[in-house]
Amino acid sequence: MQKIRKAVIPAAGFGTRFLPETKAMPKEMLPIVDKPTIQYIVEEIRSSGIDQILIISGHAKRAIEDHFDSSPELEQHLYESGKVNLLKEIRKISDIKIHYVRQKYMRGLGDAILCAKDFIDGEPFGVILGDDIVYTGDKEPALRQLMDQYDKTGGTVIGCQRVRPEQVSSYGIIDGLATDDPNLLKVRDMVEKPSVEEAPSRFAALGRYVITPDVFEILEQTQPGKGGEIQLTDALRVMAHNEAVYAYNFQGQRYDTGDKLGYLKATVEFALRREDLGPAFKEYLLGLLQDKK
């Protein structure tokens, strides 16, 4: 069984929920405190043991490439100013080797994954959406958790978390068979945004995958659906009927930073975890609440 050596970050979307900010700035570059969203995702991938990373970019996404590129003038300025720690941080970012390919037309997540076919070259691979952050502290990164399940099962693994019954209508929900592990289901099907009564489980698919290369042939045969888009979910459903596909309830605090409230939650909670900011920021928030009473 092949090891997971590569990961893909789809980051070509328009980011319309954050307009007008995202007219010229990629949503993946919106900062969580002082670090862009996509850097958290790249760090998770590298912490999971993967160093071959492909970002699927699109129109007005050049800022992502610039962020991970070297910056000789800035580095020289930091060196001359004696800002050694900042210099190390900047160099650490530019030392990450990242590949890029453009999704020329916005035809859905499935089409974005198809753009990675040559890069993947017949290997199993990880996928993390470009606006989906999971905080695990000093525990195993979320993607690494999925990779561990792939190592055990040899099949595609869909990252999931259990959601409350009233939340199932907001997600794609897994219809699956129980396994020996209560956090692992063998997928039979996926139901998009079911009612509470119709939901086959509380396992919601959430922005992380480990996928076998079989997906490319299926995506190439998948017909565009609503809005002319090719959906990854449709291909995964076909795979689940033809081979073993699993859903794993990964551990960690997830933030959908493509949503305004999710973005604000991530910013506040990451700031509160910081030793240099947390105590003072917490005091400010408590004072703000007191003033509102």
Image (spheres, rainbow, N blue to C red):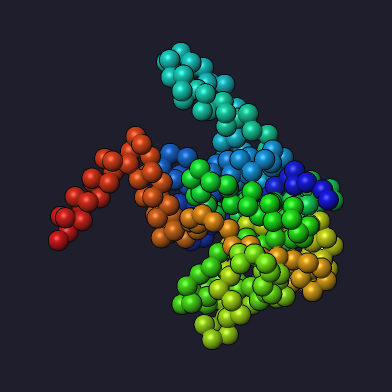
Q: Which of the 4 image quadrants contains residue 68?
A: top right
| Quarter of the image where one finds residue 237 | bottom right
**Relative depth, front residue between 245 and 51:** 245
In this view, 235 is above or below 118? below
Q: On screen, 165 above or below 117?
A: below
Give the residue at the far top of this rendering: 80
Residue at the image point whose x is 33% and y is 38% from the top: 277
Most extreme residue toward the bottom is: 197
Q: Quadrant of the C terminus?
A: bottom left
How many numbered circles are shown?
Answer: 0
| As drawn, 120 above or below 212 | above
| Residue in view at x 20 percent, y 56 percent | 289
Res 45 → quadrant: top right
Q: Position of residue 47 (x, y in %)?
A: 61, 40
Across and down, in percent, residue 279 comes to 28, 41
Camera sees residue 234: no
Q: Position of residue 235 (x, y in %)?
A: 75, 68
Left or right of residue 80: residue 60: right
| Residue 57, position as x, y percentages in the image | 65, 48
Left or right: where 245 falls relative to 60: right
Q: Residue at x 72, y 40 (%)?
A: 52
Looking at the image, which residue is at 78% across and 67% down? 244
Q: Is residue 156 above or below residue 178?
A: above
Is 117 placed left or right of 126 in the picture?
right
Is residue 15 visible to us here? Answer: yes
Seen as rendered, the residue at the extreme front is 180
